[in-house]
Structure formats: C-alpha cells, structure tokens
Amino acid sequence: MIKAITGTKDILPSDISKWYFLENLIKKIFSKFNYKEIRTPIFENTSLFARGIGEATDIVSKEMYTFLDRSGESLTLRPELTASVVRALIEHSLEKKQSLNKLFYIGPMFRQERPQAGRYRQFHQFGAESIGSNDPLLDAEMIIMAFDILAQLGLKNLEVKINSLGVPSEREDYKNVLREYLKSHLSNLSEESKKRFETNVLRIFDSKDERDIEIMKHAPLLINYLKDESLSHFETVKSTLKKANVNFSVDSSLVRGLDYYTHTTFEIVSKSVGSQSALCGGGRYNGLVKELGGSDLPGVGFAAGMERILLACENENVLSIPEDKIDLYIITLDKTKSELSYNIAISLRRKNLTVELDYLLRSVKAQMREANKLNAKYVLFVGGEELKNNEVVLKNMLNSEQENISLNEIEKLIKKIGE
Ligand code: HAM
C-alpha cells in the first residue's frame, strides 16, 4: 500500500472545521489591521531562499526540498514565505503603488526536519509582512496581531519573548566579542556548536546541549553592545506592547534561525505543547529587500505554525466548534421515486439549503439512521400514500412535528426549513 510521505499529514473531513475556524479568525484579524492577502507559488528558484534566509542556516543547509527540474534548473519547495513575499514585491514593484505594503498569507511550507509531535515536513503557516517602514510601532503590531489571534482562540499558556539584534554592524562587532569569550571554551563545546563557531556563532545560543547551555549562560549579551538608535527602537516596541496589554519577557538569547533579522525578534511559545513549543516567530528584516535586488526598504513580519496552534488548542481543550449540521435529509420511501427526491434536492440546494439524500438504495430505517448521523434539522419523506395527493411529509427533527406539504408549494418548504 502506498502511504503518505513521512512527516506529512492528511487533514481529514472530521478535522476540517477546526482549520476553517482558524483560517477565518486569521483573515478577520488581519483584515482589521488592514493587511491584504498575497498568494505566491509553492516553488521558487533555490537561490531566492539561499540568499534570503542565509546559506549557513539550518533551513538552507539541511532542510530544503531542492530538486533539479527537467531543464536542469534548481528549484525549492518554499520552506517559509518571507523571501517569496519580498521577491513578489520587488517583481511587481508593489512599493511604487503603495509606500507601505501590509501583506498576509496562509499556506503549506516544506522542511525536511526530523518529524515529531508539532514538527512536520509539510506544515502550514499563516503570517504577515509589512514592508516599507522602520516604525517600531509595526514591530509591535506584528506581536499584537499574533498574540490576539492566539488569545482569541482561547489559548492561555502563552509566553511572548522578545529581543533586539540591532543593526548588522553592531552584530558584527558583538560576534567578535562572543568569539573572544568562546575561544577559551571551544574544546568543551558540542561538535555542532564548534561548527557554528565558524559559520554562525550567534546560533550557539539555540543549542540544546547541556554543556553549551552552561557556557552560553555566562556569555556576553548582544543587547549590551547596541547603540542608542537600536536601543530606542527596542524601547518603543516594549512600551507599545505594555500599552496594548501584551505581557512579554526580554530573552537576550533569542537569535532565531534565519539570517535576515535586524532589530526586533520575537517568539510566542506555548507551555501546553511539548518540545516544539514555538507557536510563532518573527522580527524585523531591514536589509532583505535590498539583498534580494530591490530598493533599500525596511520590513517586519512573523509566521505561525498552524498544526502547533491546533495542537495547543487541543491540549488546552479550547476551540469548541459547533457540530456539523445539514438542513434537510430526503428519505425516499419508494425507490421508484428516487428521481423525484433527487430533483427536489437539486432545487433546494439551489435555494441555498444544505440537503442530502440516499445514493445507495438503502432501507428507510438505514436512511433515517443516516439523517441522524448527519444531524439533519429536517427530514422530508418522499413516496407513500401522501405522494398520491402530490404531497411530501416534512418532519422537524427537534420537536418531531410533522406537516404535509404540497409539491406545488415548494416555496413554503424552503421558508420553513430556512427559518
Ligand atoms: P520560523 O520560526 O522558521 O519563521 O517559522 C515560524 C513558525 O512556523 C514556527 O514558530 C513554527 O510554529 C512553525 N514551524 C516551523 N517549522 C515547522 C515544522 N517543521 N513543523 C511545524 N511547524 C513549523 C519563519 O518561517 C519566518 N518566515 C517568520 C517571519 C516572517 N519572519 C519575518 N517575517
């Protein structure tokens, strides 16, 4: 038997209402903040992600689904959407039509990570990008939007962590300070961190290795090497969040796994899921548009993992979605009248009612069982004695009241069911 690929998941009809609910909430909140949806292709030129996210990052060096197409071009299934959104902005000169572009997206992403609860190879993100302004109020806006979506789902065990990575020159100076500190500890670092010492020294803060954690506890912190402008940007983000009643903590080791960040970075973690606890992450990326060949435009954004959010909802037992219901189930009493039932169903569906009927020539009892299973509000009996008088019988499943209705009065039926 052919099975789904490791790390991918089918979203079955029994789960789809949760996804609809989440998607609708996302769209509602983003539209309140005046973000417009953008949809970009699932695959892009590999160089877009290599340049955008950074060659030395885990995503680019280990996790991308990259392949050569039949003409020998290197393509990659998108591991995230910030680079794609920036590419689309540049390609369509969106900044000329709108000096601040506020964009959002929802869709599948692909990373070849080791699958575990909350970590998949095809997963779904929603996210937002605001490109064209360096205003720290927009950094705060991202955190507020992400927080509001999670809070409106009913999630409680949330922790907002923020940090500032300053500007590239501050970071370069700091990296030298950090390398200097680490030199005397180098032999005690894990193999992975030894490699990162050369390629991406900041990421040693992300190590889960006990020895690395101990060493990094005493490391100098970037925040202490930021200049006034960066500090004041960060102060505004913090005071804005306070005014908006979003509780947060400053986590100076929050470096994030993508190279494009400048100034603010943030994550919202849930204490209700296991080790994959980051429900969302983001930050400012003032150099990215230029890096990808556009003009020197600042940007800020975030993305959230939808599977993880739904997992947190399940663990906290929030998100009570009303059961699926249908308006009407048509029970055909006499199989020779199936065509009439079918025609009634079609005309009622065209009048906006949700209608189902039997396609399996089932007994009346089995059809009744099906009507109950589908939570039908009404049942319509077609056939039997009543039909000789050109009538059908409508039963209200809530109070069991029955009523004969003439087939010439179908409007009456629609009105009754639609009430
Ligand atoms: P990221 O931190 O790589 O950031 O991903 C954002 C979120 O996607 C994570 O917090 C997590 O919830 C979810 N996620 C990531 N990998 C997986 C996976 N393998 N399985 C399930 N969920 C996953 C970005 O992608 C940036 N583009 C965010 C951003 C937008 N920064 C600025 N703008």
Image: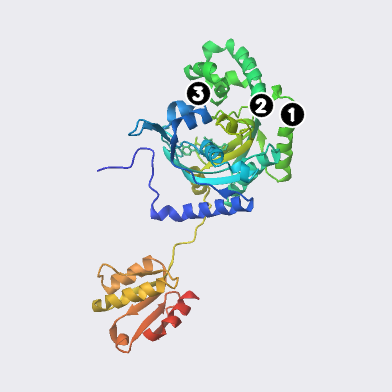
Can the viewer see residue 269? no
Q: Which residue is mark 3?
A: 56
Instruction: Tell me: residue 174, above or below residue 22.
Output: above
Q: Residues within 10 Å of mark 2 (few under 14, many from 20)?
A: some
* Residue 95 or residue 317, whichever sits in front: 95
**At 60% across and 39% down in the image, what residue appears?**
301
Q: Residues within 10 Å of mark 1 (few under 14, many from 20)?
A: few
Give amino acid for label 2: Val
**At 63% across and 19% down in the image, what residue appears?**
172
Q: CA distance from mark 3 to mark 1?
A: 28 Å
Residue 229 tag number = 1
Q: Which residue is mark 2?
A: 167
Residue 305 in percent (x, y) is at 51, 42
Q: Secondary structure at mark 2?
A: loop
Which callout, 3 or 1, points at the residue further toward the start of the chain? 3
Discs 2, 1 touching: Cβ within 8 Å? yes
Q: Secondary structure at mark 1?
A: helix
Instruction: Tell me: residue 396, above or below residue 265.
Output: below
Label 1 within 8 A of ligand 1 by Cβ: no
Q: Quadrant location of residue 228?
A: top right
Which callout, 2 or 1, points at the residue further toward the start of the chain? 2
Give amino acid for label 1: Glu
* Residue 59 or residue 276, whichever sits in front: 59
**At 54% across and 37% down in the image, what residue appears?**
82
